[in-house]
């Protein structure tokens, strides 16, 4: 990438951040939308109709509940085994990198890095997704190349820049650690150690990682004092003018689908062709999975490349419409891989007050605070 294009990239991010920067408390008068706010202080079925594009399969918001069985679940034998394996660096070739190196419970089950850092301090190409509510996902990785958590586990375990493990020899390595045999016997009825049991136990543990209810969830359950008027107005914008609900909907604020939102950086530094690298379908160039917005305040930085860590800046990027590098018909004909930004992306014409309200609502979606202690795992 030449210095001119690099400067352009930095300028785009800087402008978005600068435009988005406002004093959060600057605009607090909400008397002009009291009527809208009152419409939301009632059961969802009486709310204003969401503005969703034609043909979009979407779901209305749904509250999450406290996991009342969490502590009992953590004592289940397969979960105990899976947790030990998840935190054990001996699953890596170097004996220095564990699953928890990138998915740290103290960092929202991610690593707060732009991209992952693994074996030999090698950097990955994409931001580490959080494990919150991972049991509810329908595909895994930013490009959706894995359909199950067990399948997903093989990726970081074997990747040379992550854990760099030989999957075929991993069971033999674990067998040599005597302390694991009783854990496998408790979990599976015998002490046979196989790759399938290793990744199965890890997946079982990961499925217990769930978001805790936020102020937003309490509001949905009728405790209307938990959201401010500004946040309620932001929720209204999220469902209407800001068009967020087209992709971020349902209980976990994701449509579980893939979109090109205009951040492919085609033929420039940070280029990533996204889902295309898995499907080889030109229509998938630049498409990435819609992330959940749950607990976003503890899972930043955001986007597939981890380049964004400012909510106002992100909202301003969406406000622009994001159609920054769409090809002309001639360019597309000459280069079938030239990425096309999703037609769902449109200029929003949000004003400063609306941007502040939308950001305030997004911040209300974070409720998790419990920090899991790192467990003991067999040393020998």
Image (tube, rainbow, N blue to C red):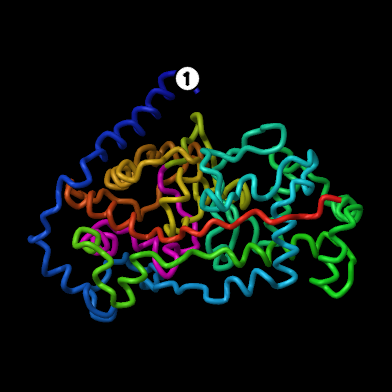
Residue toward you, 208 or 76? 76
| 48 is higher (above) or lower (below) than 289 | below
Give percent across and percent down for residue 298: 45, 50
Residue 281 is inside the magenta segment = no
Q: Is residue 119 left or right of residue 228?
A: right
Q: Is residue 113 left or right of residue 85?
A: left
Q: Which residue is painted at 28% across and 81% down in the image? A: 45
Most distant residue in the top direction = 3
Most distant residue in the left direction = 32
| 269 is higher (above) or lower (below) than 282 | above
Residue 359 in sight in this render: yes
The magenta-colored residue range is: 233-262
Q: Which residue is painted at 82% across and 73% down in the image? A: 188
The residue where tag 1 is placed is 2
Give percent across and percent down for residue 171: 87, 55
Give percent across and percent down for residue 245: 34, 63
Mark 1, secondary structure of its residue: loop
- Magenta: main secondary structure: loop
Q: Which residue is painted at 36% across and 70% down in the image? A: 217
Bin the neighbour count of mark 1 within 10 Å (Cα to Cα): few under 14, some 14-19, many 20 and up. few
Q: Is residue 56 left or right of residue 122?
A: left
Give percent across and percent down for residue 253: 42, 63
Q: Is residue 327 left or right of residue 173?
A: left
Residue 336 in sight in this render: no
Q: Which residue is painted at 49% across and 36% down in the image? A: 334
| 121 is higher (above) or lower (below) than 362 | above
């Amino acid at each position: 990438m030449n210095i001119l294009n690099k400067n352009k990239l930095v300028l785009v991010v800087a402008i978005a951040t600068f435009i988005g920067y406002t004093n959060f408390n600057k605009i607090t008068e909400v008397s002009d939308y009291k009527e809208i706010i009152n419409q939301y202080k009632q059961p969802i079925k009486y709310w204003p109709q969401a503005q969703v594009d034609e043909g979009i399969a979407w779901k209305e918001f749904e509250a999450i509940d406290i996991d009342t069985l969490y502590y009992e679940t953590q004592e289940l034998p397969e979960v105990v085994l899976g947790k030990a394996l998840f935190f054990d660096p001996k699953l890596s070739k170097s004996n220095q990198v564990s699953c928890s190196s990138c998915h740290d419970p103290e960092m929202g089950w991610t690593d707060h890095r732009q991209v992952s850092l693994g074996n030999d301090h090698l950097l990955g190409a994409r931001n580490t997704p959080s494990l919150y509510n991972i049991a509810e996902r329908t595909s895994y990785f930013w490009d959706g190349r894995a359909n199950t958590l067990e399948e997903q586990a093989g990726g970081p375990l074997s990747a040379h820049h992550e854990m760099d493990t030989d999957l075929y020899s991993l069971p033999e390595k674990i067998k040599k650690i005597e302390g694991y045999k009783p854990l496998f016997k408790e979990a599976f009825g015998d002490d046979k150690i196989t790759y399938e049991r290793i990744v199965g136990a890890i997946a079982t543990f990961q499925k217990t990682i769930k978001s805790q209810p936020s102020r937003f969830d309490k509001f949905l359950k009728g405790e209307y004092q938990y959201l401010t008027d500004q946040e309620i107005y932001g929720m209204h914008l999220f469902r209407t003018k800001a068009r967020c609900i087209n992709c971020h909907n349902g209980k976990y604020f994701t449509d579980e689908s893939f979109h090109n939102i205009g951040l492919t950086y085609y033929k420039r530094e940070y280029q990533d062709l996204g889902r295309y690298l898995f499907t080889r379908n030109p229509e998938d160039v630049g498409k990435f999975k819609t992330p959940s917005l749950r607990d976003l305040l503890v899972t930043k930085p955001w986007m597939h490349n981890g380049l964004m860590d400012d909510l106002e800046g992100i909202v301003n990027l969406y406000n622009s419409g994001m159609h920054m590098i769409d090809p002309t018909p001639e360019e597309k004909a000459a280069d079938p891989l030239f990425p096309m930004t999703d037609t769902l992306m449109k200029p929003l014409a949000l004003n400063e007050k609306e941007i502040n309200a939308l950001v305030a609502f997004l911040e209300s979606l974070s409720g998790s605070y419990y920090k899991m202690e790192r467990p003991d795992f067999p040393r020998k």
